Image (cartoon, rainbow, N blue to C red):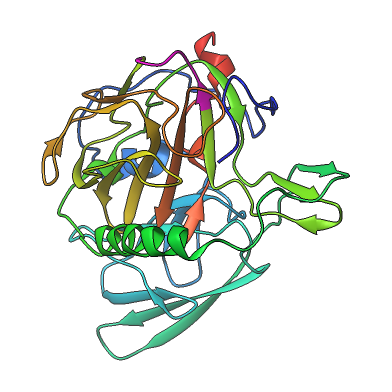
């Protein structure tokens, strides 16, 4: 979680997409679902149609042909909607080759190799060693239940159809931290930045980027994340919002795209007020900026 307005500024990166409109809430129909993302729709030999290129940190949309009953990516089950639509996510450090295993109702199994394009991640080299060191016993005693709550939240799958929507930014402003960037302290790599940061004054409202169900509204500030809110969008896709000054929704609540869910803050480990927005598809951390119009296209 890189700093917001008081920290090192990391310029916005990633492709600029032509469709800069901020969408309203609603569910997509079949063809529109594939047409929305930033990439051509391409058929695979199995009849599966994918929208968007397989790239590290990317989320793709897809649709299986009639007769496909199960799908997995490198041994991880891919949830399928009743209409055959699905999502595929690729971790920041995904290997350059993945295998999509397609199971048909007649017992046929096909393996679809997917070449995953690597991305060039921003790295910042710092001559001094990282501050901190081995966490204290007191810190670990506090941290353990926090991590358990986060892990339990991600197991709470919902029936939300927010995953079908074109996503919007939960807040607009200066992008002060980008997904995948990393600091190297005296030759030792630190953890990569797991989301995108938007700097803004404390109290700035944030909204739901898509429909979803609240799977965690931290009852007290967490040691690193501060006031943490997590929303499940369905199909293995969820969002986390960190460092909030307030959380305006409750655990289990259904939220609609554009609904206010909290306010920007600097709680937890943060050097300035900002929103840290991270996303996961199953266990793969993905780049939220791949799902929304470029901030510059919104005039921010």
Residue lying at 44% horizontally and 38% vertically, measured from the top left = 268
Q: Is residue 38 shown to the viewer in this render?
A: no
Residue lying at 54% horizontally and 11% vertically, measured from the top left = 300
The image shows residue 117, relative to residue 272, as above or below, that is below
Residue lying at 17% horizontally and 55% vertically, measured from the top left = 158
Depth check: give the residue in front, 292 or 133. Answer: 133
Stretch in magenta:
198-203
Q: Is residue 95 left or right of residue 258?
A: right
The image shows residue 38, relative to residue 113, as above or below, that is above
The quarter in which the N terminus is drawn is: top right
Q: Quadrant of residue 169?
A: top left
Q: Is residue 257 shown to the viewer in this render?
A: yes
The image shows residue 239, relative to residue 200, as above or below, that is below
> Looking at the magenta stretch, what is its main secondary structure?
loop
Residue lying at 30% horizontally and 91% vertically, measured from the top left = 107
The image shows residue 6, relative to residue 236, as above or below, that is above
Depth check: give the residue in front, 80 or 136. Answer: 136
Q: Position of residue 11 (x, y in %)?
A: 69, 26
Q: Position of residue 55 (x, y in %)?
A: 61, 54
Depth check: give the residue in front, 278 or 19. Answer: 278
Q: Quadrant of residue 72?
A: bottom left
Q: Position of residue 9 (x, y in %)?
A: 69, 24
Number of numbered discs: 0
Depth check: give the residue in front, 297 or 186. Answer: 186
Residue 8 in the magenta stretch? The answer is no
């Amino acid at each position: 979680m890189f700093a917001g307005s008081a920290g090192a500024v990391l310029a916005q990166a990633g492709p600029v997409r032509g469709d800069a409109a901020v969408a309203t809430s609603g569910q997509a129909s079949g063809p529109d679902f594939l047409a929305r993302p930033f990439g051509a729709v391409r058929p695979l030999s199995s009849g599966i149609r994918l929208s968007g290129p397989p790239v590290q940190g990317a989320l793709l949309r897809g649709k299986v042909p009639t007769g496909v009953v199960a799908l997995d990516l490198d041994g991880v089950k891919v949830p399928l909607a009743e209409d055959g639509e699905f999502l595929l996510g690729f971790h920041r450090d995904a290997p350059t080759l993945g295998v999509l295993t397609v199971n048909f109702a007649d017992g046929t199994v096909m393996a679809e190799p997917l070449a995953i394009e690597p991305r060039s991640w921003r790295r910042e080299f710092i001559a001094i060693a990282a501050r901190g060191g081995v966490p204290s016993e007191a810190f670990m005693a506090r941290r353990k239940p926090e991590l358990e709550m986060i892990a339990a939240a991600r197991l709470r799958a919902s029936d939300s159809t927010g995953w079908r929507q074109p996503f919007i930014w939960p807040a607009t402003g200066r992008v002060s931290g980008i997904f995948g960037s990393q600091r190297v302290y005296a030759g030792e790599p630190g953890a990569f930045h797991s989301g995108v940061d938007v700097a803004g004054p404390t109290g700035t409202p944030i909204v739901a980027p898509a429909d979803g169900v609240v799977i965690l509204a931290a009852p007290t500030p967490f040691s690193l994340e501060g006031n943490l809110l997590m929303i499940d969008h369905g199909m293995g896709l969820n969002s986390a919002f960190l460092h909030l000054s307030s959380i305006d929704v409750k655990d289990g609540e259904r939220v609609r795209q554009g609904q206010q869910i909290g306010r920007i803050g600097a709680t937890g480990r943060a050097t300035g007020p900002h929103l840290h927005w991270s996303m996961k598809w199953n266990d793969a951390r993905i780049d939220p900026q791949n799902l929304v119009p470029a901030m510059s296209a919104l005039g921010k």
